[in-house]
Image: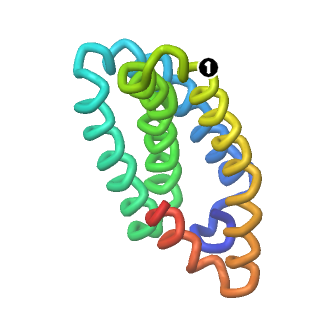
Amino acid sequence: MIRVRNADRFPAGMTSVGFWLGLTVGRVVLGFVTPRLGVKVAVAVYLPATMALELVFWLVPQFYVSAVAVALQGFFLGPLFPAVIVAATKLLPRHLHVSTIGFAAAFEGSGAAVLPFAVGAIAQAKGVQVLQPIVLAM
């Protein structure tokens, strides 16, 4: 945000706060919306919305547009993990619930540790311009 969007340090740092705030608010607000839509429909809405916001972030080189897009990405990403857990409990037999949910949480945690490191290493080697296609592909 500082280099590419020419943002000052404080507003650039607040962008990550906006993402995490969006994630939290999205889990709370969309947690009530998701059961009404149904898990499949909700995920089918949240994922394209998140991808569209990533494209806005990538293609519109203005700081404030990017900051709002990041916060809204967090908003729509927030309920995805709980929605996947709900879907898993509906699809799998009861005796597999604990181990499957535990595995999903562990896999999420390891991905949250490994993927930023790997993407950061690629960005350091090739430049920050490679970040957006990688993030969109994920």
Where 92 falls versus 6 (above or below)? above
Give residue 38's quadrant in the image.
Answer: top left
Observer-nearest of 55 and 27: 27
Displayed quadrant of residue 35:
top left
For the residue marked with disc 1, what is the amino acid?
Answer: Val
The structure's colour scheme is: rainbow
Direction bottom: furthest residue:
126
Other-residue count near label 1 (Cα within 10 Å), few / some / many at <14 / 14–19 / ≥20: few
Q: Nearer the viewer, residue 76 or 110?
A: 110
Q: Quadrant of residue 137?
A: bottom left
Up/down of 45 relative to 54, above or below: above
Residue in the picture at 46% in, 44% down: 73
Pointer 1: what residue?
98
Residue 5 x, y percent position in the rendering: 57, 68
- Drawn side of residue 25 relative to residue 105, left or right: left
In the rendered view of the protein, which quadrant contains the N terminus?
A: bottom right
Question: Where is residue 37 shown, x and y percent of the image?
Answer: 23, 21
In the figure, is residue 42 to the left or right of 131? left
Residue 93, image x, y percentages = 44, 20
Helix, strand or loop at disc 1? helix
Image: 101 above or below 122? above
Residue sitting at x 65%, y 45%? 16
